[in-house]
Amino acid sequence: MTRKVLVIGLGLIGGSIALALQKAPETKIIGYDMDEKTREHAKTLQIVHEVVTNPEEAAAEVDVIIFGTPVNATLDWMEQLKSWPLKNKVIITDTGSTKKMIMQKAGELRALGITFIGGHPMAGSHKSGVLAAKPHLFENAYYMLTPLAGEEIVNMAQLESLLKFTHAKVVSVSAREHDHMTAVVSHFPHVIAASLVHQLGDEKSEYPMTRSLAAGGFRDVTRIASSNPILWRDITLQNRDELIVQLEGWQSEMDRVKSLLLEGNSDDIESYFSVAKELRDELPVSAGAIFTSFDLYVDVPDYPGVISEVTGYLADEAISITNLRIIESREDVFGVLVISLQNENDRDRAASCIQKRANFETYIS
């Protein structure tokens, strides 16, 4: 019997899930998006096996429903589900970045006999929309599931058996654990990045050259501040309790740094940076809560044609590049050429290729 999956919301996340799940045997992927052009692109690019214009009608025939929509939109869809004619054992899940409100609404669905298991694939891209969807987006990334307490093991097993085709690391946590952990490693860093950019903006009138110097390390540190402001408005409001806790901790940490500076003890200051370096170096080099572009820094000499030389080596070994940039301000930055690749394996291959054929030093920051 063919398993039918309906994906509602065919942007980057929903589209990528749809593509990945097409690898599942005896599974038909049906897609819906409110935007007509997105539906057309999904049909043309074969993001799904079938595109529908009436999600309620399609939902009556499917075994799994996946919402690839922002949290606020998902909450609206979940409310609509209450009146939809669904299959008796349908399993419903989402992909939202916060889980507290989603799982509260899931409790309402459970009362009606509808199974909802929260989900959050923790991967992304600097691009958005269905045209950016790719089947390997979630490979080796964490895929968090947040079931309600007492969720039946058989339902979890069925959903996990489907999601394994994303090649993500599927783990189960409570909604509260999820929102706390993502606040620490994703949501709060976005707030900090935005605040640093605001601080740079204050330099514009008196020290205008500061912005030019920000082309190096500062730009890398604050990259996530370029994320969709509407999306981050919603995430910030949805997870504001956890963010307030993080902000209070951050302010205490900054008070500690201020004390170190006021005291001016060189050993204490060195120890502060040393401990931070050790902790940072222990972090896994893999997909995490914040989009990773798998950057490779290359120390290239300055002579005409060196960049085409390097890219030519990679082309010879069929290594695909997603982005390429030159860093003009090199303060605190490894290498002058930054090559972005699709995954960790490609980055390792690229580093090996460049070191072997050109003997240029490469770094992973």
Image (cartoon, rainbow, N blue to C red):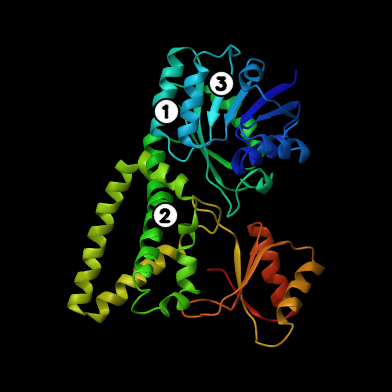
Please identify the quarter of the rendering in which residue 12 is found.
top right
Q: Earlier in the sequence, mark 2 or mark 1?
A: 1
Looking at the image, the residue that sits furthest to the front is 205
In the image, residue 244 sits, relative to residue 356, either above or below, namely: above
In the image, residue 45 sits, relative to residue 223, either above or below, namely: above
Where residue 27 sits: x, y (%)? Answer: 73, 27
For the residues marked 1 and 3, what is the alpha-carbon distance in whole angstroms? Answer: 19 Å
Q: Secondary structure at mark 3?
A: helix
Q: State the mark number for residue 190.
A: 2
Please identify the quarter of the rendering in which residue 341 is found.
bottom right
- Residue drawn at the location 71% of the way across and 37% of the way down: 42
- Residue drawn at the location 42% of the way across and 52% of the way down: 185
Of badges 2 and 1, nearer the viewer stands 2
Q: Is there CB contact under 8 Å for labels 1 and 3?
A: no
Looking at the image, the residue that sits furthest to the right is 316
Where residue 7 sits: x, y (%)? Answer: 63, 30
Q: State the mark number for residue 154.
A: 3
Q: State the mark number for residue 103.
A: 1
- Residue drawn at the location 60% of the way across and 48% of the way down: 128
Q: Name the residue type under label 2.
A: His
Few, some or many C-alpha atoms within 10 Å of disc 2 (few <14, some 14-19, many ≥20)? many
For the residues marked 2 and 1, what is the alpha-carbon distance in whole angstroms? Answer: 24 Å
Of badges 2 and 3, nearer the viewer stands 2
Few, some or many C-alpha atoms within 10 Å of disc 1 (few <14, some 14-19, many ≥20)? many
Where residue 116 sits: x, y (%)? Answer: 50, 23
For the residues marked 2 and 3, what is the alpha-carbon distance in whole angstroms? Answer: 37 Å
Q: Secondary structure at mark 2?
A: helix
